[in-house]
Image (cartoon, helix red, strand yellow):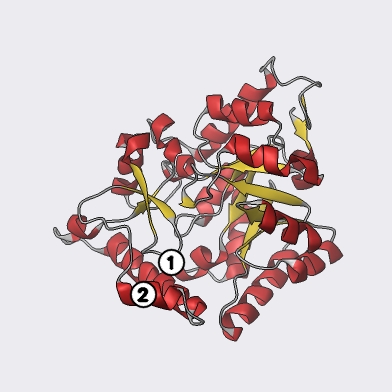
């Protein structure tokens, strides 16, 4: 067993998170990763709008596949009143269905902490710098997901080492998110002093993930130099694999909207457009579809992903590798074996 503050908070065997991924977090993937001994985070927008599940029924379905702990991702950025109410309802349902670990992103998590702590649960918050870490701590979060410059999805400006140096004095468990694809990076993060890691890209290239097969193959075939960024998907930088027709920047009009008081509306429009495009690409049988697949989100951990395997096998193999690592001793900061 590898014990850290995170494994204690989450009630899992290994300090590894299968991160929430839109649109890739189908219930079979979440359950399979959890079954491997780490913590898998479900993504409610993906569960309901992409994979077609009623949230409560989707959670109950995952419980038929595993009895291991599962977490919940709450995107709480300011937006429409309807979206806020829906997310609040989803959190209530997750709590009623026994989920006790929540990861908040893109907003002020005080109200989520209030709900979750009332049930004895834990809230970890996504951050990219000290400013947002301090705001999260003020809101009562129990830990921080430290998103670095090697992450897939929304990425931060700092390396894993720089983030740890900046946040290690805050007294909260820290999770390294970005660039973790193999045992080597996992060991490095824990040796630095992190309480765990969050992985996303590695778990897309799995047998249980129901994303299109060419997405998985693109990850396996890609190297670190194939990863770049774009803000055309959500309005903020997101890591993607380079492809034909790729563009980094939005149009002049969208850029102006993102800088205005309508920025939240503009981001919602971009997200909606991305959702429609992904739904179309996942279902289309057209020979022209490949030409339109410009944005496959992935982090720089593609460098070490060279196979498509079961998420359970990946999680278990990585977790068990920690048990025999002589460098993770009781003298390692915040980490004991």
Give me the C-alpha separation between circle 1 and circle 2. Answer: 8 Å
First in residue order: circle 1 vs circle 2: 1
Residue furthest bottom in the image = 81
Quadrant occupied by the N terminus: top right
Callout 1: helix, strand or loop? loop
Left/right of residue 137 with respect to residue 74 in the rendered view: right
In the rendered image, which quarter is residue 312 located in?
A: top right
Q: Nearer the viewer, residue 37 or 228?
A: 228
Which residue lies at the image location 76% right of the left edge and 71% below the top edge?
111
Which residue lies at the image location 34% right of the left edge and 64% below the top edge?
278
Q: How many marks?
A: 2
Residue 219 appears anywhere in the view: yes
Q: Nearer the viewer, residue 250 or 47?
A: 250
Residue behind mark 2: 254
Callout 1 touching callout 2 (CB < 8 Å): yes
Q: Is residue 127 above or below residue 176?
A: below
Quadrant occupied by the C terminus: top right
x%, y% of residue 266? 44, 77
Residue 98 appears anywhere in the view: no
Callout 2: helix, strand or loop? helix
Residue behind mark 1: 235
**Pointer 2: residues within 10 angstroms few (<14), some, or many (20+)?**
some
**Pointer 1: residues within 10 angstroms few (<14), some, or many (20+)?**
many
Residue furthest top in the image = 326
């Amino acid at each position: 067993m590898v014990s850290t503050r995170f494994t204690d908070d989450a009630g899992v065997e290994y300090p590894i998170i299968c991160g929430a991924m839109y649109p890739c977090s189908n219930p079979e993937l979440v359950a399979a990763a959890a079954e491997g001994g780490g913590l898998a985070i479900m993504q409610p927008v993906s569960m309901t709008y992409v994979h077609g599940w009623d949230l409560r029924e989707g959670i109950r379905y995952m419980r038929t596949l595993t009895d291991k702990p599962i977490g919940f991702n709450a995107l709480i950025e300011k937006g429409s009143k309807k979206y806020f109410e829906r997310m609040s309802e989803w959190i209530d349902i997750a709590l009623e269905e026994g989920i006790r670990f929540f990861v908040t992103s893109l907003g002020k998590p005080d109200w989520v902490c209030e709900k979750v702590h009332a049930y004895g649960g834990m809230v970890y918050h996504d951050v990219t710098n000290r400013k947002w870490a301090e705001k999260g701590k003020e809101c009562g979060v129990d830990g921080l997901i430290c998103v670095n410059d090697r992450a897939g999805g929304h990425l931060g400006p700092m390396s894993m080492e720089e983030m740890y140096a900046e946040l290690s004095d805050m007294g909260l468990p820290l999770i390294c998110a970005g660039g973790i694809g193999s045992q080597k990076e996992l060991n490095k993060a824990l040796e630095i002093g992190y309480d765990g890691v969050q992985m996303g890209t590695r778990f897309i290239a799995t047998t249980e993930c129901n994303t299109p097969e060419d997405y998985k193959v693109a990850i396996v075939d890609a190297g670190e130099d194939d990863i770049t960024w774009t803000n055309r998907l959500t309005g903020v930088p997101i890591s993607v694999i380079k492809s034909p027709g790729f563009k980094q920047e939005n149009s002049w009009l969208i850029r102006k909207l993102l800088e205005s008081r309508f920025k939240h509306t503009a981001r919602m429009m971009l997200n909606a457009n991305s959702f429609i495009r992904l739904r179309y690409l996942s279902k289309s049988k057209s020979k022209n579809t490949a030409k339109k697949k410009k944005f496959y989100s992935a982090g720089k951990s593609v460098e070490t992903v060279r196979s498509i395997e079961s998420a359970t096998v990946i999680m278990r193999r990585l977790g068990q590798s920690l048990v025999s690592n002589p460098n993770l001793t009781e003298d390692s900061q915040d980490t004991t074996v």
